Image (cartoon, helix red, strand yellow):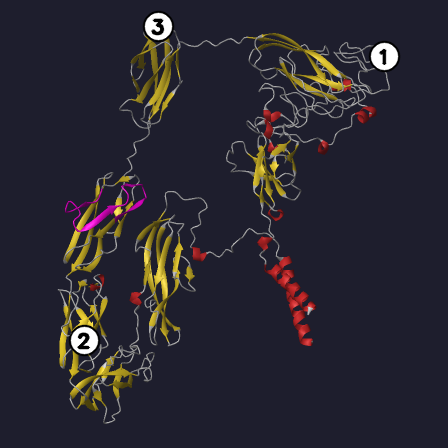
C-alpha cells in the first residue's frame, strides 16, 4: 500500500510540473540602459572599442549583446543613411571612413534575457597624425639599443587601459559623474583647457588640447612631433628629440648645456628636485622637468578672464627613487594643474599639463608649484604669467538688431534700433526706391533706449520679382550718425485662399409612423456633414423653416469643421404630436463659404384605434342551493388590441363581485393585458342571475356575460348534455384546459330544470401532442361535479367528453429580402483611420423555438478585399482600410431548414451588399495596421523565450510512469 502511495505521489508531481506554464520559469527580460561610449580616436588606423562601464545592467558578459559598426555621413542628421561596416567587438578606422562619423550600436540578446539597444558615435574620422618617432629639427636621432628596448617595452594595444575620453564633437555637456571621472582629480580647470568630457579614468592617458599623453613604458614624450609647436609660447625654445632621453641611463647625455647625470654622489639635484642618496634603504625621490629645462614655466602675457587654445603647457614628473610613489592632490592659487592619480613606479615618468586658472584678475603672477607624495617625495617648478585687462570694443551710438531684411511674403517685420549714446537721438527713416514702408518714419529714441520699427512691403509690387532697396535711419542732429539696412523683397504668387465645402450624405430623414398618444418619440437619426474643402468651416446653428423648431428637436454636434472632418446633424420628432403628417426643413450654413445645407425631416402620427377584448367572453357558474357557501371565483383577462394606451374604469357587477385592480394596472399599453376575478355575491335568493359586466376605458368598451343559478331545494339529475365540439385551434396550442378552450361548466338536466354543473377535464390523459405538426383530432374526458342540492338518485355516470380539433402547423418560412447588414452606413464615408464595425442579420435567425419545416438564413462569410468566414455567432466583424477608394462589403447567407431536431443547410445562397467610400485621413498614426482583423494569419507572440523541451521531457516521463503503473496492475 505504501508503494502505491509513493508511486501516486511521484506521478502527481510529474503531472503538475508538465502542466505548469513556461512563464512560471521565464525570467523577465532586462532592457539595456545607461550610456554607451566609444574608446579611441576616429583616426585612420586607430582601433575603436566599446566602453560599457556606464551601461546598465553592469557586468554584461560576452554573448549578452551584439555589436554593429556603421559609417555615417556628416550631413546625415537623422541616421537615415547608415552603412554597416562591422559586427566585431572592435573596429579599425580605414581611409574609407574619412570625413564620416563612426556609429556603434549594441543590442541585447533576447536568448540571454536582454532587450533594447544603445548607440554612440565618434567625431568625424581624420587622417593619422604624423609619426612622433621622427627626429626633431637641429637634433640628431640616437639609434635605439637592445637595452633601450628592454627598458622600455612596447605596450600592446589590448593592454592599454581603456579611457572615457570624448571630444567636443562626440558629446556635448556630459556631467563629470557620467563621463568616467570617478578616479580623476582636477582642480577647477578652465573650460577651454579641460572640458568634463575630456576627463579619463587614468591621469595622463590621453592628450588634452594638444598635450601629449603620458607613456607607461617610462619614456617621457615632453614635446610634440615635428610641426606641432602649439605647446610653446616662446618660439625661441628648441624642441628636443625624445630619443636623446632614451639612453641606457637617464641623464647620460648633455642637453642644451645641462650637464649629464653623475653616477657618484655629486650634487646634481636639477630643477627643484631631490637628491638621490647612496643607500640600500628605500629611497623616495622625484624630479620635475620643464620644456626649456630651466624649471620655470612661462606663459607670457595673456588677456585676463580668457583661456585660449595654446595657453596650456606641460611638465614631466619622474620617480627617481627606488620605491613606488603615491602623489597627493595639488591646487595652486593662480594655476590649474593635472594631478598624478595613479601610482608612479621607480624610473617611470608622467607628462602633466598646467594652465592659468580661469577667472584670475589682471596682474603678474609667479607660483612655485610642488608635487608631493604620501611618502614625502617632492618635485617643484615655477609658473609665471602676466594677465592684462582686455580692451572693450567701441559701441556705435546707433545700432540695429538686424543687418539685413528679406521679405518672401507680404507680412510685416520688426527692426529694433538702440541708442547707445548719452543723448536723445531724433531719427528719420527713408528708402532709396520706396520698396518698403517704414512705420514710423520719424521718431525720437531716448539715451540708452530702443525703438521697434515695423517694415512692410509697399503696395503694387509684382509677384516673383526681386526688389532691392536700402532703409537709411539718419540722426537729424548728426548726418554722419546713420544706420543703413539692405532690403530684398520677392513676393510669392498670389494663391487663392482655401475654401471649405460642406455637404450632407442625406437630404431627408424619415422617422416613420407612430400612433397618436405615443409616449416615447422614435429614436434620433442624423445626417453626416463632411467638409470636402481645404479650409476649416464654421457652421451656423440649424434653423427651421418655421423659425423655431416646431415638430422636431435638432442639434448640430460641432460648429467648427476642419478640412476633411465630419460632424452630425441630429434630429428627433417631438412627443405629444396629434394625428397627422409632419414635415420640417432645417438649414445649416457654412459661414466660411456662404453655403446652405438643408435637411428635411418627415414624421407621421396615425389616428389611434381603440379596441379591447376579454377572455373568456362569458362565465358560467355551477348552480347552487339557496344558502350556498362562497362560490369559487373565475378569472377574466382584458387585452388592449388598439394602438393607443387605455386607462380602464374599475369594473363592477350587480350580482357578482369583481376583484379590485391597482390604479397603475388599469392603464394598459397596446398589446398589454390586465386580469380580474369574478364570483357570485353571497346570499343571493332563488333564481337565475345573468348579466354583462362592462370593462371600459371611455374610448373602448368590452363586456363579459356571467350566469349563476340559485335553486330552491333538492333536485335529481336526469341527463348530462354533451358540450359542442371545439375546432380551429392553432397547431402547437398548449396542452391545458384554458388553451384548448374547454368549458368550465356543462349543462345538466334535473327534475327541477336545466342547471350548470362544474366540470374537471383530464387533459393530461388525452392523446394530444403539442409538438406534432400534423392535424390532430382528439377527445378530452371530464368529470362533472353536481351543484349543491342536486342528487344522483338515478345513478348516472358523472362523466362527459368533448371533441377537440387542432390544425396542422404552417412552417415559418423566410425571404432572402429580409437579410440585412447593420452598423455600416450605406454609401457611408470613412477615412483610412476609421474602424468600421458591422453585424450580419440573417432572416429567421431570431427563431429560438423552431419547428419542423421552419427556415432561416445563416450568415456564412463576408468580403471586402479578402473573404473571411464565421464559424459561430456573433456574426460581427471590424476592419479598416489602409488605402482610399470606393469599396463594397458583401455578406453571403446560406438557407437552412429545421428537420425537427436540428438545422440543416441547403445549397441555397443569398447575399447583401453595402457600398462605402474611404478617403485618406489628414494624419495617419505611424505603424498602424489597418488590415481586416479577420484576415490576419500571424501567430500570437508571447515574448516568452523559455525552451519547452524540458517540459516535454517531464510530460513524457509522467506518461511512461502512468503506463508502467497500469501494466503493473494488470499483471498483478
Q: Residue furthest top?
A: 477
| Residue at image mark 2 | 682
The stretch in magenta equals: 541-569
**794 vs 87: above or below:** below
Q: Nearer the viewer, residue 80 or 697?
A: 697
Q: Residue furthest bottom?
A: 794
Q: Is residue 560 magenta?
A: yes
Q: Nearer the viewer, residue 910 or 856?
A: 856
Labelled pair 1, 3 in contact (Cβ < 8 Å): no
N-term mark: 1 or 3: 1
Q: Residues within 10 Å of mark 2 (few under 14, many from 20)?
A: some
Q: Position of residue 24 (x, y in %)?
A: 59, 53
Q: Please, what secondary structure does the residue beneath circle 1 have?
A: loop
Q: Please, what secondary structure does the residue beneath circle 3 have?
A: strand
Tell us which disc is closer to us: 1 or 2: 2
Q: Which mark is residue 478?
A: 3
| Residue at image mark 1 | 265
In which quadrant is the N terminus drawn? bottom right
Amino acid at each position: 500500500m505504501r508503494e502505491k502511495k509513493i508511486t501516486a505521489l511521484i506521478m502527481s508531481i510529474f503531472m503538475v510540473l508538465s502542466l505548469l506554464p513556461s512563464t512560471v520559469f521565464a525570467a523577465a527580460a532586462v532592457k539595456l540602459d545607461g550610456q554607451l561610449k566609444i574608446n579611441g580616436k576616429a583616426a585612420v588606423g586607430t582601433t575603436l572599442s566599446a566602453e560599457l562601464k556606464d551601461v546598465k545592467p553592469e557586468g554584461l558578459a560576452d554573448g549578452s549583446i551584439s555589436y554593429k559598426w556603421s559609417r555615417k555621413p556628416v550631413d546625415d542628421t537623422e541616421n537615415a543613411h547608415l552603412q554597416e561596416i562591422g559586427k566585431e567587438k572592435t573596429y579599425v578606422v580605414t581611409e574609407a571612413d574619412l570625413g564620416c562619423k563612426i556609429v556603434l550600436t549594441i543590442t541585447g540578446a533576447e536568448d540571454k534575457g536582454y532587450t533594447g539597444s544603445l548607440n554612440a558615435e565618434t567625431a568625424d574620422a581624420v587622417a593619422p597624425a604624423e609619426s612622433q618617432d621622427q627626429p626633431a629639427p637641429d637634433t640628431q636621432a640616437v639609434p635605439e639599443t637592445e637595452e633601450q628596448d628592454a627598458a622600455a617595452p612596447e605596450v600592446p594595444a589590448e593592454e592599454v587601459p581603456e579611457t572615457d575620453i570624448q571630444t567636443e564633437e562626440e558629446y556635448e555637456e556630459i556631467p563629470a559623474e557620467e563621463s568616467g571621472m570617478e578616479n580623476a582629480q582636477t582642480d577647477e580647470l578652465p573650460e577651454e583647457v579641460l572640458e568634463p568630457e575630456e576627463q579619463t579614468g587614468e591621469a595622463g592617458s590621453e592628450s588634452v588640447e594638444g598635450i601629449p599623453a603620458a607613456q607607461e613604458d617610462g619614456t617621457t614624450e615632453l614635446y610634440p612631433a615635428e610641426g606641432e609647436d602649439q605647446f610653446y609660447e616662446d618660439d625661441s625654445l628648441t624642441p628636443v628629440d625624445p630619443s636623446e632621453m632614451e639612453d641606457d641611463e637617464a641623464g647620460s647625455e648633455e642637453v642644451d648645456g645641462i650637464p649629464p647625470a653623475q653616477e657618484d654622489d655629486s650634487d646634481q639635484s636639477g630643477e627643484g628636485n631631490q637628491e638621490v642618496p647612496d643607500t640600500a634603504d628605500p629611497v623616495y625621490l622625484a624630479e620635475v622637468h620643464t620644456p626649456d629645462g630651466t624649471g620655470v614655466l612661462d606663459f607670457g602675457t595673456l588677456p585676463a578672464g580668457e583661456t585660449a587654445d595654446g595657453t596650456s603647457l606641460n611638465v614631466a614628473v619622474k620617480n627617481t627613487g627606488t620605491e613606488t610613489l603615491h602623489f597627493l592632490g595639488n591646487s595652486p592659487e593662480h594655476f590649474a594643474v593635472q594631478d598624478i592619480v595613479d601610482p608612479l613606479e621607480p624610473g617611470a615618468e608622467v607628462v602633466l599639463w598646467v594652465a592659468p586658472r580661469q577667472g584670475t584678475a589682471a596682474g603678474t603672477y609667479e607660483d612655485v608649484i610642488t608635487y608631493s607624495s604620501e611618502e614625502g617625495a617632492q618635485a617643484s617648478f615655477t609658473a609665471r604669467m602676466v594677465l592684462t585687462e582686455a580692451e572693450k570694443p567701441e559701441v556705435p551710438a546707433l545700432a540695429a538688431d538686424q543687418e539685413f531684411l528679406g521679405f518672401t511674403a507680404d507680412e510685416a517685420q520688426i527692426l529694433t534700433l538702440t541708442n547707445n549714446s548719452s543723448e536723445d537721438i531724433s531719427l528719420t527713416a527713408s528708402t532709396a526706391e520706396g520698396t518698403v514702408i517704414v512705420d514710423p518714419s520719424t521718431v525720437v529714441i531716448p539715451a540708452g533706449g530702443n525703438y521697434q520699427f515695423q517694415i512692410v512691403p509697399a503696395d503694387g509690387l509684382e509677384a516673383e520679382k526681386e526688389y532691392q532697396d536700402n532703409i537709411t535711419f539718419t540722426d537729424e542732429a548728426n548726418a554722419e550718425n546713420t544706420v543703413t539696412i539692405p532690403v530684398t523683397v520677392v513676393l510669392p504668387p498670389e494663391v487663392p485662399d482655401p475654401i471649405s465645402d460642406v455637404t450632407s450624405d442625406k437630404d431627408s430623414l424619415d422617422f416613420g409612423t407612430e400612433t397618436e398618444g405615443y409616449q416615447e418619440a422614435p429614436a434620433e437619426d442624423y445626417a453626416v456633414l463632411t467638409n470636402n474643402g481645404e479650409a476649416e468651416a464654421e457652421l451656423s446653428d440649424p434653423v427651421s423653416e418655421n423659425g423655431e423648431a416646431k415638430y422636431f428637436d435638432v442639434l448640430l454636434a460641432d460648429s467648427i469643421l476642419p478640412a476633411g472632418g465630419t460632424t452630425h446633424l441630429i434630429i428627433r420628432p417631438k412627443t405629444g404630436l396629434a394625428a397627422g403628417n409632419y414635415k420640417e426643413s432645417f438649414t445649416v450654413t457654412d459661414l466660411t463659404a456662404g453655403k446652405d445645407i438643408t435637411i428635411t425631416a418627415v414624421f407621421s402620427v396615425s389616428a389611434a384605434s381603440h379596441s379591447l377584448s376579454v377572455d373568456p367572453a362569458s362565465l358560467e357558474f355551477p348552480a347552487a342551493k339557496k344558502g350556498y357557501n362562497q362560490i369559487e371565483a373565475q378569472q377574466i383577462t382584458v387585452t388592449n388590441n388598439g394602438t393607443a394606451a387605455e386607462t380602464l374604469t374599475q369594473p363592477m357587477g350587480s350580482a357578482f363581485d369583481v376583484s379590485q385592480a391597482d390604479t397603475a394596472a388599469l392603464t394598459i399599453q397596446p398589446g398589454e393585458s390586465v386580469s380580474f376575478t369574478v364570483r357570485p355575491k353571497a346570499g343571493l335568493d332563488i333564481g337565475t342571475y345573468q348579466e354583462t359586466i362592462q370593462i371600459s376605458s371611455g374610448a373602448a368598451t368590452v363586456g363579459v356575460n356571467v350566469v349563476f343559478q340559485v335553486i330552491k331545494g333538492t333536485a335529481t339529475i336526469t341527463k348530462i348534455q354533451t358540450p359542442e365540439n371545439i375546432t380551429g385551434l392553432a397547431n402547437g396550442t398548449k396542452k391545458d384546459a384554458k388553451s384548448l378552450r374547454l368549458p368550465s361548466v356543462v349543462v345538466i338536466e334535473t327534475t327541477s330544470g336545466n342547471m350548470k354543473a362544474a366540470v374537471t377535464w383530464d387533459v393530461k390523459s388525452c392523446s394530444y401532442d403539442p409538438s406534432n405538426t400534423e392535424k390532430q383530432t382528439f377527445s378530452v374526458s371530464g368529470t362533472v361535479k353536481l351543484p349543491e342540492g342536486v342528487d344522483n338518485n338515478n345513478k348516472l355516470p358523472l362523466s362527459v367528453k368533448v371533441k377537440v380539433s387542432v390544425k396542422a402547423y404552417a412552417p415559418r418560412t423566410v425571404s432572402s429580402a429580409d437579410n440585412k447588414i447593420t452598423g455600416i452606413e450605406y454609401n457611408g464615408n470613412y477615412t483610412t483611420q476609421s474602424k468600421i464595425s458591422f453585424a450580419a442579420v440573417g432572416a429567421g435567425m431570431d427563431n429560438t423555438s423552431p419547428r419542423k419545416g421552419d427556415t432561416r438564413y445563416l450568415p456564412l462569410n463576408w468580403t471586402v478585399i479578402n473573404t473571411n468566414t464565421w464559424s459561430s455567432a456573433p456574426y460581427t466583424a471590424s476592419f479598416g482600410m489602409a488605402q482610399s477608394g470606393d469599396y463594397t462589403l458583401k455578406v453571403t447567407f446560406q438557407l437552412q431548414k429545421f428537420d425537427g431536431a436540428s438545422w440543416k443547410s441547403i445549397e441555397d445562397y443569398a447575399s447583401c451588399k453595402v457600398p462605402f467610400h474611404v478617403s485618406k485621413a489628414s494624419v495617419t498614426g505611424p505603424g498602424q495596421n489597418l488590415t481586416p482583423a479577420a484576415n490576419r494569419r500571424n501567430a500570437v507572440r508571447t515574448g516568452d523565450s523559455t525552451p519547452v523541451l524540458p517540459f516535454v521531457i517531464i510530460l513524457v516521463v509522467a506518461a511512461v510512469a502512468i503506463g508502467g503503473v497500469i501494466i503493473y496492475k494488470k499483471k498483478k
